[in-house]
Amino acid sequence: MKRILMLISLCVVVLASCESKKHEKELESNYLVTSPVRKDTLLTNEYVAQVQSIRNIEIRAQERGYLQDIYVDEGELVKKGQVMFRIMPKLYEAEQQKAEAEAEFARIEYQNTKQLADSNVVAPNELAMAKAHYDKAKAELALANVHLDFTTIRAPFDGIVDRLHLKLGSLVDEGDLLTTLSDNSEMWVYYNVPEAEYLEYMDTKNSEDKKEVQLLMANNKTYNQTGIVQTIEGEFNNETGNIAFRATFPNPKGLLRHGETGSVITTIPYKNALLIPQKTTFEVLEKHYVYVVSDENKIEAKEIKIASELPHLYVISDGITEEDKILLEGLRKVRNGDKIEYEFEEPEQVINHLQLYAE
């Protein structure tokens, strides 16, 4: 039994010795080290966006009848005042003619009564009654003219016709949807911004300057017009903690359409920002750390504060300085307090390599 225990102890010592030698061998190899760098940069943010026309309205029937004529087609560009639909007007034409006749009769009656009143043949009250009857007839004629005009449906502004919801000859009820008309001369692009970024925007906002943004379309191409942030909604969404921004984009060639999706790209300038590669960091319990190399070539884990994130880079607000040397590669091969041999790589070269890798 004792012999077995001695053999086990000997194996443990040998294994520990092997592991120690293996670790020392790993530490003997050179590691790449770099330093943070300070430089002016741009922080780019991307937000899911919804594109809408500055005017997008439903064209509905205002009278009942058969759809007699359709003068437009789906996707057609129409001008303000252009006739789009006509509902069979015969009934409304008859009502208008009847109202015209009644108005003419009331006018003649009023003129005759006025002549008699001027000669003191009839009482003033009778003249007032004739005048009221004439005014009523004129009002009914005006109403008949309105009903007749409603049978001809015109474009209220320049725009693009959407889907036609009814076919020629359909029986149309008052309020039925005929189509939708979109004014795409300019587009409103809505995107949601977190509360922290909203506060940052308001702190740096200059009333004289307009914030410019770009639109990344669904085909991953950038729209060739620049948008201007003009409006921020009045309330935050309690569920998401976001608030909606609205940017206006010119649309001279009509490329953008109502209902499109894309991404709004914003840039925020950072002056004298402290930058490190993302791959130099590691995370423990939701805190970010880097390994800093001391003058004795020993590594020490230091907590850092990340201000913003760039492609392959972090903007650091606290924890290290540009004088520090940080471990660039091999973070998983070392432990806190290990002594290492290293080669130093200039931070500009590291960043250029990251940019080439990103491309």
Image: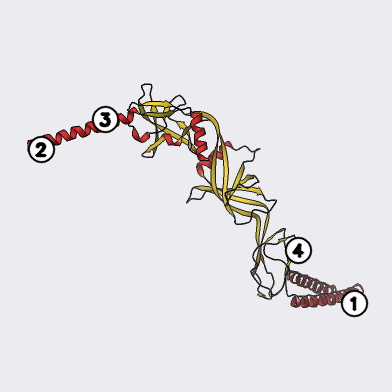
Q: Tell me which amino acid carries mark 4.
A: Gln
SS at mark 4 in the image? loop
Can you identify the residue that label 1 sits on?
121
User: Who comes first in sequence, dot 1 or dot 2?
Assistant: 2
User: Who comes first in sequence, dot 1 or dot 4?
Assistant: 4
Q: Nearer the viewer's eye, disc 1 or disc 3? A: 3
Can you identify the residue that label 2 sits on?
4
Q: Tell me which amino acid carries mark 1.
A: Val
Q: Nearer the viewer's eye, disc 1 or disc 4? A: 4
Q: Tell me which amino acid carries mark 3.
A: Lys
Badge 2: residue crowd in 10 Å (few <14, some 14–19, many ≥20): few
Q: Nearer the viewer, residue 181 or 345?
A: 345
**Up-down relation of residue 272 to residue 113 (above or below):** above
- Residue 21, label in figure: 3
Q: Residue at image x 75%, y 63%? A: 82
SS at mark 1 in the image? loop
What whole-number distance in Å separates the C-alpha atoms at marks 1 and 3? 133 Å
